[in-house]
Image (tube, rainbow, N blue to C red):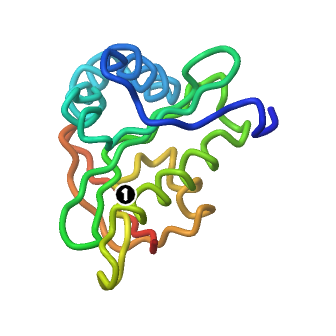
Amino acid sequence: MHPSHWRIRLARAGEEAALSELAMRSKAHWGYDAEFMARARPEIEINPAWISAAQVLVAEDTRGLAGVAGLERTGPARFDVTVFFIDPDRIGTGIGRSLFIALAGHARGRCAPGEPDPHLTILSDPNAEGFYRRMGARRIGEEVAITGRTLALYSYAL
């Protein structure tokens, strides 16, 4: 699908449940079992406070919600990617790339002039590492996620 067939916007109040379900479908796409998905749910669910703070972006196309991405400021010019999920039917269409670029731009726009070393940090599911590397992120270490798994930690310069 061509970028002109989708748009990226801020999430709206009331979309939390639909966006959380999109995120759960996206995560489950990679074959995780029900027990793992139950442990992952708190990490994946979209918090209404994130939406009200304009920290969540949505990609939508002619069929509806196609992706969700969120960020949280963790310090001067530093942001964590809190969620990043593409609907399984849209993986490989370019929506993920467009959403990532928009999220980076959104973070950049929240930086004050002169803030040093602006960047995103991303705790990546193993299935998404290739995507983040293609986007230009570099691996800087690893962290333990809420699910108990050790995941790769990436940095993306804004």
Residue shown at 50%/68% (left/top)?
A: 137
Q: How many numbered discs, if any?
A: 1
| Residue that protrudes farthest toward the right in the picture | 2
Vertical comparison of 14 with 29: above or below: above
> Residue beneath label 1, please?
122
Residue shown at 23%/58% (left/top)?
A: 73
Give how far across and how far down residue 146 sits, in percent: 18, 40
Foreground: 63 or 155? 63
**In the picture provided, is 37 more to the left or to the right than 95?**
left
Residue shown at 40%/30% (left/top)?
A: 11
Vertical comparison of 124 with 27: above or below: below
- Bin the neighbour count of mark 1 within 10 Å (Cα to Cα): few under 14, some 14-19, many 20 and up: many
Give how far across and how far down residue 82 sits, in percent: 31, 45
- Location of the N terminus by quadrant is top right
Give how far across and how far down residue 142 sits, in percent: 29, 64
Vertical comparison of 149 with 137: above or below: above
Location of residue 80 (image quadrant): bottom left
Residue shown at 22%/29% (left/top)?
A: 47
Foreground: 97 or 130? 97
The amino acid pointed to by label 1 is Ile
Q: Secondary structure at mark 1?
A: strand
Foreground: 74 or 142? 74
Give how far across and how far down residue 110 sits, in percent: 34, 61
| Residue that protrudes farthest toward the front in the picture | 113
Location of residue 117 (image quadrant): bottom left
